[in-house]
Image (cartoon, rainbow, N blue to C red):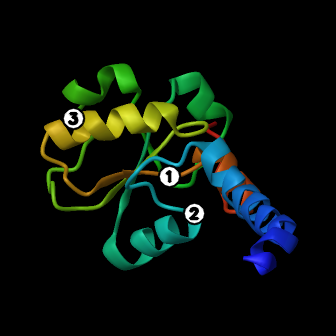
Amino acid sequence: MNFLAETWYLFAIALVSGGLLLWPTIRRGAPAGGVSTAEAVLLINREKAVLIDVRDPAEYAAGHVMNAKNIPLATLESSTLLPKNKALPLVVVCNRGAQASRAVVMLKKLGYENARTLTGGLMAWREANLPVEKSA
């Protein structure tokens, strides 16, 4: 018991450092089932994942992930741009991930069980120095 009483500050330091390590994930609001930029690239290359950008057309035109389809959140349920094959993985992108989370819920109701958000959205994609293109 003396050991714990004399070294309590080491336990406090360990707890604080663990919390600081988790802080970026908590702050970013990583949704359950989200994928990191590295995981998204693997899904695109290995499983032919389709990128769906749910932002408004003006935001999309200003810069988007290469080869992403722009299907604004408001038109998602009625869009004809969604792939016919509902087994394909979908990676849903917005600015930070909030709109994408709502879109994934909608897509799963439509039968797209492999729909996932890009954790951190387009901001995370840019921070990872991955290619972004602008519409003409």
Q: Can you identify the residue that label 2 sits on? A: 37
Q: How far apart are marks 3 and 1 (CA)?
A: 22 Å
Residue located farthest toward the top when viewing the structure as drawn: 74
Of the image marks 3 and 1, the number of the one nearer the N terminus: 3
* Label 1 environment density (alpha carbons within 10 Å; few <14, some 14–19, many ≥20): many
Q: Quadrant of the C terminus?
A: top right
Residue at disc 3, secondary structure: loop
Of the image marks 3 and 2, the number of the one nearer the N terminus: 2
Of the image marks 2 and 1, the number of the one nearer the N terminus: 2
| Residue type, mark 3 in image | Thr
Left or right side of 65 for 127: right
| Residue type, mark 2 in image | Thr
Who's the residue at 21% across and 34% down the image? 80
Q: Is 14 above or below relative to 107?
A: below
Q: Can you identify the residue that label 3 sits on? A: 80
Q: Where is residue 95 in the image (x, y as percent from the top left)?
A: 60, 36
Residue 64 visible? The answer is: no
Q: Where is residue 82 in the image (x, y as percent from the top left)?
A: 25, 43
Q: Label for residue 32? A: none
Residue at disc 1, secondary structure: loop
| Residue type, mark 1 in image | Leu
Q: Where is residue 121 in the image (x, y as percent from the top left)?
A: 58, 45
Q: How far apart are marks 3 and 2 (CA)?
A: 26 Å
Q: Is 109 above or below relative to 15?
A: above
Asked if marks 2 and 1 touch (Cβ < 8 Å), the reply is: yes
* Label 2 environment density (alpha carbons within 10 Å; few <14, some 14–19, many ≥20): many
Who's the residue at 36% across and 52% down the image? 116
Who's the residue at 40% across and 51% down the image? 32
Q: Nearer the viewer, residue 26 or 49?
A: 26
Q: Can you identify the residue that label 1 sits on? A: 118
